[in-house]
Amino acid sequence: MFRPVMLFLACLAASPARAECPAEPSWQPLDFLEPGDRWVDLYWLNFNLPGHAIHYDGGTEHYEDDGRYRFVAGPQSWEAPRYVFYASGARCIDYPEGPRVDYYVLSGGRLTLINEQGERFVGLMTN
């Protein structure tokens, strides 16, 4: 009986751990900010995004009230069991393949997502 338990524990230890959203964002967008960009904060993100959708030219992201996340682009959809907001204006999507951290700013009154490559995407928020 001892041996199967040890084998089970060894298998658990050998299983790769799934990466999750970090305690703090893994990068900062300082090199990608433009004049007039205004940071949003944790309060802004928590107040405005849950229960809403953000529409971009390439797809729509959905922040569910229960903490789940979904991005839809045409017939394709990507889902994550949770999202995390940070005081710095960043958000992390806890995708099964690994976390993704992006930042939001308000630019000219428009919600703009900045990704780790510095690409900017202007979004329109709806219910």
Image (cartoon, rainbow, N blue to C red):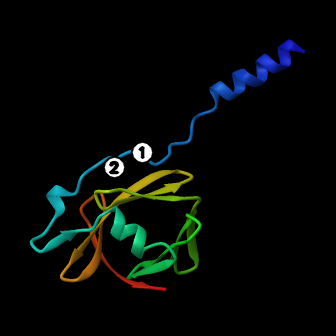
> Which of the 4 image quarters holds residue 57?
bottom left
For disc 1, the marked residue is 22
> Which of the 4 image quarters holds residue 44?
bottom left
Q: Secondary structure at mark 1?
A: loop
Question: Which numbered disc covers residue 30?
Answer: none
Q: Tell me the residue at 24%/75% (across/down).
A: 106
Residue 25, horizontal then vertical, whole percent: 34, 49
> Which of the 4 image quarters holds residue 49?
bottom left
Q: Is residue 67 left or right of residue 120?
A: right
Q: Amino acid at mark 2?
A: Pro
In-front residue for pair 82/123: 82
In-front residue for pair 29/119: 29
In three-dimensional space, the C-alpha distance between marks 2 and 1, rounded to whole angstroms, equals 6 Å
4 over 127 or under it: above or below = above
In-front residue for pair 30/77: 30
For disc 2, the marked residue is 25
Residue 47, horizontal then vertical, whole percent: 41, 72
